[in-house]
Image (cartoon, helix red, strand yellow):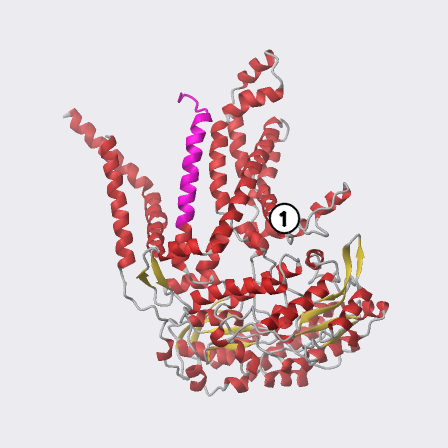
Amino acid sequence: MEQLKARKYNRREAIAGYLFISPWILGFLIFTLGTMIYSLAISFSHFNLATNKMRPGGLDNYRALLEDPRVAGSLKNTLFFAVLAVPLEVVFALFLALLLNRVRWGAGFFRTVYYLPKMTPAVATASIFLLLLNGNTGAINTALRAVGLEGPQWLVDPSWVRPSIVLMALWGVSGTMVIFLAALKNVPRDLYEVASLDGASPVRQFFTITLPMISGAVFFNVIILTIAAFQVFDQAYLLFWRDQTNVAPEASLFYAVYLFQQAFRQFNFGFAAAMAWLLFVILLILTTIQVKIGNRYVYYEGDR
Amino acid sequence: MEKRRTAVMAAWVAIALGLVTATAGCESGGADEGGGGDSVAFDSNVSGALSAWAFDNADDVGQARIDYAAKQLSGVSIKMDQTGFDAQKFTTRLASGDVPDIVQMDREYVPTYAAQGLILPLEKCFSANNVDPEQRWYPNVVGDVTYKGQVWAVPQFYQPPAILLNTTVMDAAGVKPEDIDTSQPDVLLGAVQKMYKANGGVPTVLGFNPSATGQTYLWFISQGGKLVGDNGAPTLDDPSNVYPLETLKKIVDAQGGFAKYKSFTDSFDTFGDNNQFVKNQVGAEVDAQWYPNVLSPYKDKIKLGAVPFKGKDGQPVTVAYGGSFVIPAKAKNPSAACKWALALTEDGSWDAAATARAATIEKDKAINTGLFTGSPGPDKAIRDKYVKPSGNAGFDQVISTYYDVVATGKSAGASPAGQQLKQELTNAITSALLGQKTPQKALEDAQTATMSAYRSIAGS
């Protein structure tokens, strides 16, 4: 009898729990899973926007991906960006977090100031960077000139287009920085005290205590930043592709930009959906590799 | 436990795949043709509701026209979405079937939607309202929205480009207006060299700003190029397009090369108090007709003149697109949409607009540079009625030049791959001017990319 009562209570509790999270479940089913399945369907079809009808297309769109040199070109640009941006973003965000972690006076003020870029709309950031990165009169090249260096034509020279977008991405690392800051706050103080007593230098303490203790946060940020880097769109679009009169070198054609063009300028929805699924598979493979490698080096407190 | 979890996952995958197959299969065999717009009937007697997506941030001219058109459609309730055209938003609305009755968009975009059957051809709209497009608008303006022999939009505005002269810079260098002649590149280059100044290799004064990427169509069409062929197919690799690109390269190379030229022009305070004419950063510049309006508040600080842009044959020529109104194939009230667009572009509407503009100019004590409506009748009427000597001879000569060239307009053509064509042509210009590719190779590559877009949009 008691057992039956307990079971009934548990079921009621479970139902209540599911009801509480049902808005999220519904949102996920309709706006995430539903649209994913629909896009998968579109990727295997020829979709006509005028009639809103799909014709089965088999693997046509996936075959077209292989035949279109711009798919490979845009993927190469995106990979280049990811390889350059992710390590720099991690290092820069960690550097800022370490600085903020040491601040004793006005810590809240500085945290707010450093987080502000995250709150700035991408369009406003892009407008500022168009001025900062101007090859002749921009602040970055003016500063370089002051120390005797001739800066590149960031927004025009194809070799410097991708680094210029990396610079813009670095501006927005404050989200990553906050995660690092939280992780740093969780590192037990006594570990540093013991290390100091043993005569360990700050650099040694960083590599033997800080880094291992925040390895979980590093791992998380690397995965999130890698996924974001492969989906880079707004920075490239706002700097180079916002209208047809912009100088948009091929070096700035990122995968997501090309996907957008295929879907909304050329109405190749099947092709664009296939591109999205190819990106999904690439990210799945990359994340799996990162998890496999990460598990060897990441320290999980209380787990092992 | 593990086996059970695997089985549950397998079941989910099966359900997902089943859904995919079912969805992909559904409606299979559906025709791939367009929306069948030819069967839509237009009537000049209109009623009901009209949903319009147009007039983003309407100014005095726009508001006067909206008010005028509303009076002409007194039995219709008009609801407006006054945001700018956005291709992604439009596509999403088309996909959902929730479309406005009329949409304002650039003329360059029109053939793209026409080729997909997403908008209606307007022959029946014009005939129901006794409008002859060839009479109402300049031929080149109608040409911009004519695809496969049919007119797909109600066009508005034609603001031709010409060359603005900064007399201060030109006089100091001993350059005469007749030296700024785009039909004689050698003469032009001589003038450029006299006016061009640089500091440490960085330009400080451009002799001539050709607006290389902003006036793309003008450069190619005026210099004998051909961008669009039969059925709107791109022809970027046509041998006639090499000369305009080579000419542009010579002009830009004489002024520090493309990278420095572009960065310099990007730093102009084009709409501000320190614009390139006030700061004497250009000797001459290709500008559309609206730019003298921007400069008019600075009339006492600058000495301005203008000459027509000349084609390879030595004759004045202009090429530019403008705005238009299109009716989506799934519009619920196409007759009202048609009548509204035509009301907005008829003589009375432009007269109301010109009256409103004259009042604004009177209040701001600015110069009336006229309105360039896309229609020859209203253009002449507005010039005769409102454009009077301003007391500034330079500005008056500028205004007169733009009015003189408006009838020399040529259409760059209407291509379903118009957006991609513009982008690829800009890419070709960039790579050729940067010296990464020869003009010929740059144009060939641009043609390949545009042709791919053309095939996917036009389905040929």
B159, B431: nearer the viewer: B431
Magenta-drawn stretch contains A301: yes
Q: Secondary structure at mark 1?
A: helix
From this view, report whether residue A92 is shown above or below residue A234. above
- Magenta-drawn segment: A277-304
Query: What residue is shown at x 50% (from left), y 80% (from top)?
Result: B343
In the picture provided, is B88 more to the left or to the right than A90? left
In the picture provided, is B359 more to the left or to the right than A21? right
Outermost left residue: A1
Residue A299 picture location, percent across and down: 46, 24
Question: The C terminus of chain B lies in which quarter of the figure?
Answer: bottom left
Marked residue chain, label 1: A
Residue A304 picture location, percent across and down: 40, 20
Residue type beneath disc 1: Trp
From this view, report whether residue A282 is shown above or below residue B374. above
B187, B162: nearer the viewer: B187
In terms of image quadrants, where is residue B363?
bottom right
Outermost top residue: A198
The residue that disc 1 covers is A160
Query: What residue is shown at x 32% (from left), y 40% (from top)?
Result: A20
Dominant secondary structure, magenta: helix
A120, B454: nearer the viewer: B454
Residue A97 picture location, percent across and down: 58, 31
Residue A162 picture location, percent across and down: 59, 47
